[in-house]
């Protein structure tokens, strides 16, 4: 998983944005790897039940395809801070909630089967909210609008079939 996070950190800013629908952007240099990504639309940070201002790095929801490596629609999220390793990050969309495995500043779906379930729920939803807890005890809720998500995923599937 750490290799994927490192790869995403390098690819997202460097790869050309091939298509952009609403806030979702497709990144790909060639058909070997495609990523659709969006920054959070809104973020709420709380500690002890009170809203607080915090300094965070980049916050993005990412879905990636690297067919040669067997990665097809992997759902990941970077919250811009180290997650509490004892608490899962959750993704809620379209009336469903999914637990994600976290590793440092990244959270991932736990399996390819979960990726497929989450991807289907995201495609049917209007927004997705990811909730995480930092190692400092701050709870974050990042909401991502899903307008344009279907179009970005369709473009990724066309470019990186597998």
Image: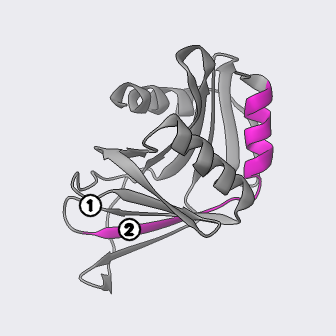
Residue 102's x, y, as percent? Answer: 33, 47
Read off the residue under disc 2.
140
Residue 153 part of the magenta segment: yes
> In the displayed structure, would residue 72 be above or below residue 154?
above
Residue 45's x, y, as percent? Answer: 37, 73
Residue 52's x, y, as percent? Answer: 32, 78
Residue 137 part of the magenta segment: no
Read off the residue under disc 1.
134
Mark 2, Cα crowd under 10 Å, few <14 / some 14-19 / many 20+, is many
Magenta span of residues: 138-158
Residue situated in front as seen by the camera: 89 or 112:
112
- Distance CA(mark 2)–CA(mark 1): 8 Å
Q: Residue furthest bottom?
A: 50
Q: Cβ–Cβ below 8 Å for labels 2 and 1?
A: yes
Residue 12's x, y, as percent? Answer: 55, 33
> In the displayed structure, would residue 152 be above or below residue 47?
above
User: Which residue appears at 55% of the width and 60% of the height?
Assistant: 40
Q: Is 62 placed left or right of 34 in the picture?
A: left
Quadrant in which residue 32 is drawn: top right
Q: Earlier in the sequence, mark 2 or mark 1?
A: 1
Indicate the secondary structure of the residue bearing disc 1.
loop
> In the displayed structure, would residue 105 be above or below residue 97?
above
């Amino acid at each position: 998983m750490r290799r994927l996070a490192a790869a995403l950190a390098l690819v997202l800013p460097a790869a050309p944005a091939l298509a952009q629908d609403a806030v979702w952007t497709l990144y790909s240099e060639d058909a070997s790897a495609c990523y659709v990504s969006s920054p959070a639309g809104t973020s709420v940070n709380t500690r002890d039940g009170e809203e607080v201002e915090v300094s965070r790095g980049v916050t993005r929801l990412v879905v990636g395809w690297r067919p040669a490596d067997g990665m097809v629609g992997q759902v990941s999220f970077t919250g811009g801070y180290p997650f509490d390793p004892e608490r899962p990050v959750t993704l809620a969309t379209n009336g469903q909630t999914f637990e994600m495995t976290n590793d440092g500043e990244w959270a991932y779906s736990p399996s390819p089967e979960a990726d497929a379930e989450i991807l289907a729920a995201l495609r049917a939803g209007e927004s997705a909210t990811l909730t995480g807890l930092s190692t400092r005890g701050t709870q974050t809720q990042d909401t991502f609008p899903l307008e344009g998500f279907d179009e970005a995923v369709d473009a990724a599937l066309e470019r990186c079939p597998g």
